[in-house]
Image (cartoon, helix red, strand yellow):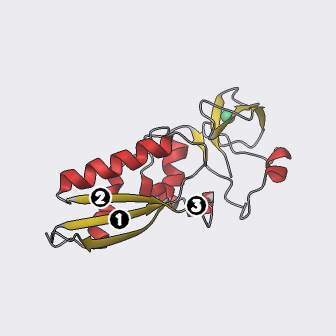
Amino acid sequence: MDTGKQQILSLLQQVADPEVPVLSVIDLGIVRDIKLFTTPLGEEGIEVFITPTYSGCPAMDVISMEIKMLLLEYGFKKVIVTNILSPAWTTDWMSEAGKEKLKAFGIAPPHPMRSVCDTELFAKEEAIQCPHCQGYNTRLISQFGSTACKALYQCNDCQEPFDYFKCH
Ligand SMILES: [Zn+2]
């Protein structure tokens, strides 16, 4: 097998975030590095370094498992998934394509103007764009949406509730 990193990265596009199935781990920007190695038995191995989007996110275990299964199926004899906790993931790592996909899925993407996320900023209820009518006249309903990684918003214009992918 003669596999380049780029090939592996495009393969990993198949691994979706179980909470937001339209987003792959590549869209999320959580795959930080890939290392190919040879095991003492001369077999091909791969180590994938990922940074969790959210420390308490149970989705991360599912993602690790899916990466392992996919690469084993692809032919690697040994697959290691290593979590890198520092630097912490930020929504800036999400690809532009990923943000567009979120919107199409009906989830407001992370605020494009925000470069540093902190809870204080979030508490100010910064204008979040409604993914349905594109209006900014929205309000926070709950800090926790359908999952802990999302907040629930409602649009004052079209009255549609929607999830906002939280900054953390
Ligand atoms: Zn709306």
- In the rendered image, which residue does mark 1 sit on? 47
- Amino acid type, label 1: Glu
- At horizontal 45% and vertical 44% (from top left) the residue drawn is 61
- Residue at 65%, 32% in the rendered image: 145
Residue 88: give x, y in percent of width and height: 62, 61
Disc 1 to disc 2, C-alpha distance: 6 Å
Residue 41: percent from left, percent from top: 16, 68
Q: Quadrant of ligand 1?
A: top right
> How many residues crowd around disc 2 within 10 Å: few (fewer than 14), some, or many (20 or more)?
many
From the viewer's perspective, is 152 left or right of 37? right
> What is the quadrant of residue 151 in the picture?
top right
* Left or right, 22 with reference to 80: right
Earlier along the polypeptide chain: callout 1 or callout 2? 1
Q: What element carries label 2?
A: strand
CA distance for labels 3 and 2: 19 Å
Q: Determine contact: label 3, label 2, CB under 8 Å.
A: no
Residue 112 horizontal/vertical position (percent)? 67, 58
Q: Report the amino acid beneath label 3.
A: Leu
Residue at label 3?
85
| Mark 2: amino acid | Val
**Where does label 2 land, which residue?**
79
**What residue is drawn where x is 55% and y is 37%?**
106
Q: Does the residue labelled 1 lie within 8 Å of ligand 1?
A: no
Q: In this view, does 129 lie to the left or right of 75?
A: right
Residue furthest top as drawn:
159
Give coordinates of residue 6: x percent, y percent.
Answer: 31, 71
Residue closer to the observer: 91 or 3: 3
